Image (tube, coloured by chain):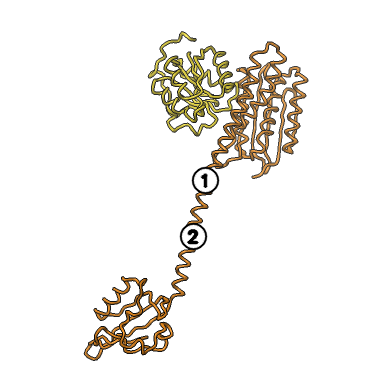
Amino acid sequence: MRTLIVEDEMLLALELESEVEASGHEVIGVASDFAEAIRLIGRQAPQFAFVDIQLRDGPTGIEVGRHLASVGIPYVFVSGNLKRIPEDFAGAIGAIEKPYTMNGLQNALSYIDALLDGARPSSAPSSLVLSHLPFVMEAQPRKTRAAR
Amino acid sequence: MLITDPRQDDNPIIFSNRAFTELTGYSQAELVGQNCRLLQGPDTDRAAVHKLREAVRGERDVAVDILNYRKDGSTFWNALFVSPVRDRDGAVIYFFASQLDFTNIKSKEAELATARFIAEAEVARRTAELSEALSVKTDLVHEVDHRVKNNLLTIASIIKLQMRRTADGTVERTLKSVLDRVEALSTVQRKLLNDERFGRFDVAEFAGDLAVDIVGSLGRPDIILTTDLHPVIVSASKASPLALIVNELLGDAVRRGLSDGGGEIHLEIRRLNSHLLIRVVDTVTPVDVDKEQNDFSRAMLDASLRQLNAKIHRQVEGYRTDVRVTLLVDN
């Protein structure tokens, strides 16, 4: 799965990248502000994204999220302050709260993985806060699974 | 008081008493024959004059507060009352006027109004200042919280990045041991309350999360985790040592056999009167523990217990270990 990481702390992005790759996915890029994120979304056609809210140019992660939702790319927020997430979750599947643990992140990754595969995993791990609205995969079928 | 005669041209004063002379500075001789308008001056309210004139014309009683001028040009506030005096046939023959100097009252009113205005302005200014200070403080707290969380995650990331790069099992185990403690602190930082109960945290919620995380990370389906958790809200200043205590108790069970052969682990958090109880009960098949890791864990546990003035009671029966930690907490 082609994954985009939107995060302005490069060490956190680097470690998240390692974790995502270890779980068998491809990281197509790291964006640290709004413009970079929009550019990468347009050029690299990610299939999934992790989006931090506080970026280099301010709390622009929310707008990045809305853009992802508008083009039908599933994503989760990764943030230290979940209260910043709007009521409608800006179309996100859910959110991973910082500072997450290695196991918490891996659990969240496996759950998201299963969800995007079309499976209906029983219950979300505590490290992943789901949005109120159920994420319906049928509405946004994954075009390719070649990256797996 | 004074009396005027409306039947004469221009309604002149025909009598004034001594009090009126004392009030205005005009003698009776100076007043007789004059119209009352000689008491008016540039700052006399035209509306008050108009009200007075209309009442006289309509032959009605009137009470009006009016600014009048003395002979020497100084002013006084006059609570004026004018009343027509009629003969047997009802025709108005005189106007009777009484005066009351209420300058002092008037100035006190003005003083009060000014004082109230100043006080209200001051309250508004202070309120704005406090709102501003509160907003700055809230922003600051969020900024600091954000930094602490990011820094904890950065520390964990550095350790994990190095773990990924090492081929040495001992180095990896050591780094993992450090990471476990950092992650316990991360979990507690995530659980600190940022709402109106700011500066407090729920030990049960934190401990439950940590237990699920630690047991989950072992990836063994043969571990049965049970919990009996009741919210206990304590001061955030106790958060870090409490995080390490829970972490070391759970970690001890993991090292003694949970990670090797599975087993049962039970976590209990509750309030016992004014005490907090943290209880971890495990049933595992014992394995040899790494002495170094074990000693280190004991040192961490002891230091955290001392920090909180907590008591520990450990009971071992066969493969079952029951550890209770109690400490005094405020209500």
Which quarter of the figure has residue B171?
Answer: top right
Q: In the image, B317: left or right of B149?
A: right
Residue A84 drawn above or below residue A20: below
| Cα gap from disc 1 to disc 2, whole angstroms | 21 Å
What is chain A's hue in the picture? Answer: yellow
Which residue in the rendered view is the most extreme toward the left?
B89
Q: Nearer the viewer, mark 1 or mark 2?
A: 2
> Which chain does the residue under circle 2 lie in?
B
Q: Position of residue A103 (x, y in %)?
A: 59, 21
Report if residue A106 is visible in the image.
no
Query: Left or right: where does residue B110 sit relative to residue B327?
Result: left
Mark 2 surroundings within 10 Å by alpha-carbon count, few (fewer than 14), some (14 through 19), many (20 or more) = few
Give A136 or B312, whichever is nearer the viewer. A136
Identify the image quadrant of the C terminus of chain B.
top right
* Residue with the mark numbered 1: B132
Which residue occupies 30% across, 76% down? B52
Q: Chain of mark 1?
A: B
Q: Nearer the viewer, residue B235 or B159?
A: B159
Identify the residue position indicated by label 2 in the image: B118
State left or right for residue B189 relative to residue A90. Answer: right
Tell which residue pokes out farthest to the bottom in this image.
Answer: B88
Circle 2: residue type: Ile
Chain letter, orange in picture = B
Tell me what residue is drawn at x 39 percent, y 77 percent: B69
